[in-house]
Image (spheres, grey):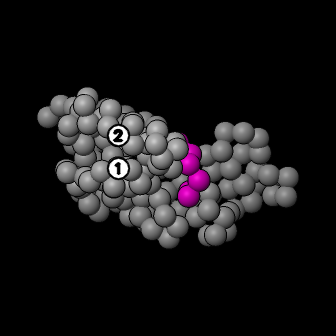
Amino acid sequence: MPRPLTEQEREAFLAEPRVAVLSLPSDNERPPLTFPTWYGYRRGGEITYYTHRTEPKSRKLRLLREGSSLSLCVQREEIPYKYVTVEGTVVAVNEDPTDEEKFAIVRRYMPERDAWAYLNSEKESATNLVLFTIRPDRWSGLDFGEDAG
């Protein structure tokens, strides 16, 4: 039987470098837009995420405007399963994020030298990046481990 995560367990889990799945409600008759992403998180703080501004009429960018609500799910794929879901609101849109803001996200997923190389390669391929800040409004999380029940 799974057990709910404590607040401390939830925050520690979100602070691990896991891929999140972000889901945005649609603004038309299409289903929600859902995609995997790297994210930034510090315990007790907001969640950050950045994306490329590849086209002016991007569905993703349109749905990620300030004030938008969304869902984020982070999971451990190995048995025993564990996951955290976050319902949140986009509270800031930064159309010119600094290298340090982007590095704070990328560094969670790769060694420092590789993270800077990755960011430098992004500069060459895409000059327009947008950073979104998400305020967590509601949380839930379950642990399916042996000690869960």
Residue type for callout 2: Leu
Helix, strand or loop at label 1? It is helix
The mark nearer the N terminus, 1 or 2, is 1
Q: Which residues are magenta?
A: 14-20
- The foreground one among 51 and 4 is 51
Q: Are marks 1 and 2 in contact (CB under 8 Å)?
A: yes
**Residue 34 occupies which quadrant of the picture?**
top left
* Relative image position of residue 92 (x, y in whole percent): 26, 60
- The foreground one among 80 and 113 is 113
Total residue callouts: 2
Rendered residue at 76%/41% (across/down): 79
Rendered residue at 59%/53% (across/down): 16
* Relative image position of residue 147 (x, y in whole percent): 85, 58
- Residue lying farthest to the left in this orientation: 56
Mark 1 crowd level (few <14, some 14–19, many ≥20, 10 Å Cα): many
Tag 1 residue? 102
Residue 71 shows up from this direction: no
Helix, strand or loop at label 2? It is helix
